[in-house]
Image (cartoon, rainbow, N blue to C red):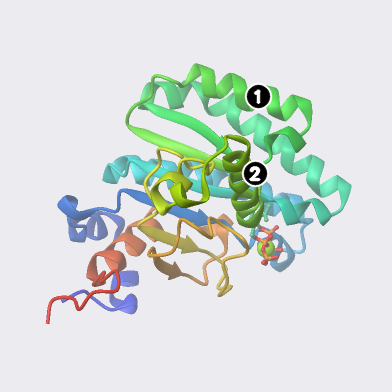
Amino acid sequence: MTPSKEELERLSEAQLLELVDRDYVPNHVAIIMDGNGRWARKRNLRRIFGHRQGADAVRNAVKACRELDIRYLTLYAFSVENWSRPKEEISALMKLLEGFLRKEKKEMIAEGIRLNAIGRLEDLPTSTQEEVAQTKEATKDGDELLLTMALSYGGRTEILEAVRRMMDAGVEPKEVNEENFHRYLYTDGIPDPDLLIRTSGEMRISNFLIWQVAYSEIYITPTLWPDFARRDLYEAVIEFQSRERRFGGLGKD
Ligand code: IPE
Ligand code: IPE
Ligand code: MG
């Protein structure tokens, strides 16, 4: 029997780790990192301080995935809709991302982490595009964890771009099926997420991986992203392991 959420919260990080079934960790975890602004507002700080703290949470989430030997981690860092935010917030977010990649590159290489990026990368400032490209190149031999950052990402945009590319390639209507459609998505070669986490309690997908999460287990926590620690990821995985995935079938009984 899986302990209740309250019981899990009373356990230490080491005790939580012991509860994780190492033979059944999700292969791919995707996270909607939400709540940075609210975290800052609660402290009477400007939103950017929440984003700054959020970058530390990213570091922790990556470490927790390495600890559990999770092979794919996809983080929703900036949506196509986020371009509607104030200019200052957008440029601060881009600078934060660049600084994050610059600082973490060495450790990523040491840890076998390979960076990947999905979305309308061409919309990002040139300096951000360059930092992303350099980090991808520097980490390309990493084979422990594929860390995908969704940047200027929109699920509907991704699907429309896939359709356009498919038509450009001259694919016949009768050849269109789920498998070859997947090849035209940004996530070609990446298995669908097993576990989708959203922080800050919002009960929505916000245009994230809408094709790929068709059968993902969803875990929503009220914790704001800057407060999301390694133990929170372990709790999500323990909860995931207690779920029965049926994929439309009848399940075990
Ligand atoms: C998530 O935090 C970060 C991004 C979307 C870039 P928010 O900035 O959305 O924080 P809230 O939702 O306003 O608290
Ligand atoms: C989703 O968060 C996008 C990212 C985490 C990058 P938002 O804060 O943009 O989503 P909504 O507006 O609450 O749906
Ligand atoms: Mg938000």
Question: Does label 2 point to a residue whose CB lies under 8 Å from ligand 2?
Answer: no
| Image x and y of residue 48, in percent | 75, 50
Q: Which residue is mark 1?
A: 131
Asked if residue 121 lies left or right of residue 118, the reply is right
CB within 8 Å, label 2 to label 1: no
Quarter of the image for residue 238 reads bottom left
Q: Local crowd at mark 1 within 10 Å, few (<14), some, or many (≥20)?
A: some
State the image coordinates of residue 202 (x, y, percent, origin top left): 58, 73
Tell me where residue 220 appears, x and y as whole percent.
47, 70
Residue 114 falls left or right of residue 13: right
Q: Mark 2 = which residue?
A: 164
The residue closer to the viewer here, 20 or 81, is: 81
Residue drawn where x is 52% and y is 18% of the image: 137
In this view, 246 is above or below 67: below
Quadrant of the displayed image that contains ligand 1: bottom right
Work out whether residue 70 or residue 39 is closer to the camera in this orientation and state it: 70
Residue at the far right: name it: 87
User: Residue 20: where, in percent of width, then height?
Assistant: 21, 57
